[in-house]
Amino acid sequence: MKVLIDQEQIRRGIDQLGAKLNAQYGPEPITVVAIMTGSLVMLADLIRCLEMPLRISLIRASSYRGGVSSGELHVEEIQRLDIQDRDILLIDDIYDTGKTLLEVSKRLKELRPRSLKTAVFLNKQGTSQVQLKPDYSVFDIPNRFVVGYGLDYDDYYRNLPYVAVLEQSDLEQHHRAAR
Ligand code: IMP
Ligand code: MG
């Protein structure tokens, strides 16, 4: 597996995003809405860099199975969110086509937050299919399938502390070993 972003780079990148958010939001409380499961690791690291009072809401959105998008997005737990008149920071692991961020943003806006900003850990270059771009992203990456730091292939590899490109030989090994 080829490491694309190592642990130290990730630590510095998340610290910098935290500092930027602290400066821009100031002491006002925010609600961090995190799209599970991919943003789990970023969530845990980022919130410890944030200084304002904050609440966390977890939602689920999934369209990928075994590395391939089914094209249909499932969003769960969004109806019960208490975000009206609150400042919302929506976070996700990666911006690829942008459809997830767009769709989730639309649904959150229906609940009338005071403000809504989006932050992603990775921003894939040249793959966007929508107008909406993330307000913040930690790293730009080339158009490759990556795993680690929350990102999965078939729900595996989320625990890797770095970001790696999944190559054909890794896939073959994965299909022999995982079940
Ligand atoms: P989008 O809706 O196409 O922007 O895709 C966003 C979602 O696709 C993310 O939340 C990820 O779950 C998944 N995804 C896209 N690219 C990758 C990748 O390279 N590795 C792992 N998951 C990815
Ligand atoms: Mg995912």
Image (tube, rainbow, N blue to C red):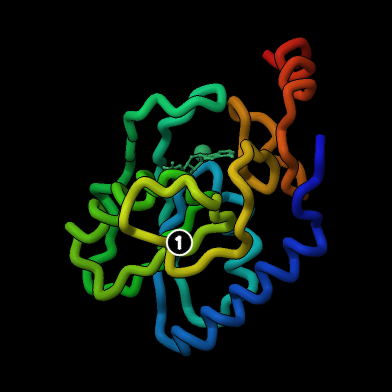
Query: Would residue 111 be found to the left or right of residue 9 on screen?
Result: left
Closer-to-camera residue (96/158): 96
Tag 1 residue: 56
The residue type indicated by label 1 comes to Ile
Question: Label 1: few (<14), some or many (≥20) within 10 Å?
Answer: some
Looking at the image, residue 105 sits to the left or right of residue 112; the answer is right
Quadrant showing the N terminus: top right
Q: Is residue 19 above or below residue 42?
A: below
Can you say which quadrant of the picture contains the C terminus? top right
Q: Residue at x 52, y 88 (%)?
A: 23
Q: Nearer the viewer, residue 171 or 89?
A: 171
The response on whether ligand 1 sits within 8 Å of label 1 is: no
Q: Position of residue 36 (x, y in %)?
A: 49, 44
Q: Position of residue 90 (x, y in %)?
A: 41, 61
Provide the secondary structure element on which disc 1 rests: strand
Total numbered labels: 1
Left or right of 30, for residue 141? right
